[in-house]
Amino acid sequence: SGNIQLTTDGRTWRRVNTGTTNNLKAIHFPKNNNDTGYVISNNGVIKKTLNSGVNWQDVSLPTSDNLNSVFFVTATKGWVVGEAGSIFSTFNGGTNWGMQLSPVTEPLFDVFFRDSLWGWIVGANKTCLRTTDGGQNWTEVTNLPFNGSPDLYSILFLPGSAVGFICGSNGCFARTNDTGSTWDTTTIAVNYDFYDISFPLNSQIGWVCGTNEAIFKTTDGGVSWIEEVSFGT
């Protein structure tokens, strides 16, 4: 319902006005930029803040597709992805957007760029796309080690590293040491759906979270994972 909560101390939260009642799907602040951020929603809705999330303004996007993920590699250069394989990019902070040619029509759930040229997108039915030229061309990644056609919800590469991770439905979790040339499954002994990966501190300490209150932590760069204590209900 357009709800964003803002904290400045991690302890207390207050709701900010976004000007929309749409369900919000994802929020992203470009690295090293605390002021500028973006939030996306269904029906092609994008909102932008220039004051650390206190106020939000509309950004025009030439689509009414439901959007699922947003990522900016700089304060001005970013991408959004969504339903029916839709991929849009901007090079001026969201003032103008262009559609990028997508080789698939599957729903796309997450987009991540390691730098301005190398990027990845994951989606439904084992969909994984890669670009090495800033999104001018996207190619399907077909060497993933998953059985069947699981939905892939999140992809992440460690800063300045060839190490990356993909996670998805039914316990799917994989790691690469060579920028995605090869992928190896990482054993997490549950069949939960995993929705998000984060390494906020350094390249060794990270978390993955999913259904049934699942939170797993690594302290060795994703080689092994230990389940965190449940919050309870």
Image: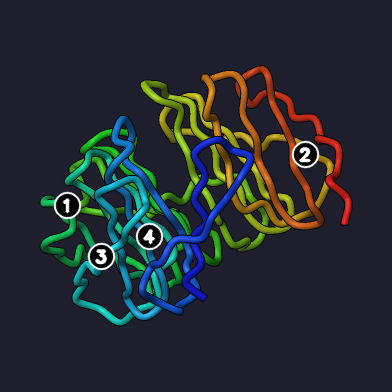
Q: Nearer the viewer, residue 89 or 130?
A: 89
Which amino acid type is shown beneath numbered disc 4? Val
What is the x, y in percent for residue 218?
Answer: 69, 26
Closer to viewer: mark 2 or mark 3: 3
Identify the residue under disc 1.
Answer: 93
Residue identified by numbered label 2: 188
Residue closer to the observer: 31 or 115: 31
Q: Return the disc, 1 or 3, that comes first in the chain's sequence.
A: 3
In which quarter of the view is residue 107 placed? Answer: bottom left
Can residue 185 be seen by looking at this rendering?
A: yes
Task: Classify mark 4: residues with Cα within 10 Å, few (<14), some (14-19) or many (20+).
Answer: many
Report the mark closest to the observer, 2 or 1. Answer: 1
Mark 1, Cα crowd under 10 Å, few <14 / some 14-19 / many 20+, is: some
Asked if marks 4 and 3 touch (Cβ < 8 Å), the reply is no
- Estimate the spatial distance between the alpha carbons at disc 2 and disc 3, rounded to whole Å: 41 Å
Judged from the image, the secondary structure of the residue bearing numbered disc 1 is loop
Q: Is residue 165 above or below residue 71?
A: above
Q: Is the residue under label 4 in contact with that under label 2 (CB below 8 Å)? A: no
Marks 2 and 4, the one that precedes in the sequence: 4
* Distance in Å between CA atoms under marks 4 and 3: 10 Å
Q: Is mark 2 in CB contact (under 8 Å) with mark 3?
A: no
Q: Which of disc 3 and disc 2 is earlier in sequence?
A: 3
Q: Pointer 1 and pointer 4: residues touching (CB < 8 Å)?
A: no
Evaluate if marks 1 and 3 touch, with contact meaning CB atoms under 8 Å apart.
no
The residue that disc 3 covers is 57
* 85 versus 227 height, above or below: below
**What amino acid is at disc 1?**
Gly
Residue at numbered disc 4: 39
Q: Earlier in the sequence, mark 1 or mark 4?
A: 4
The Cα–Cα distance between marks 2 and 1, rounded to whole angstroms, is 38 Å
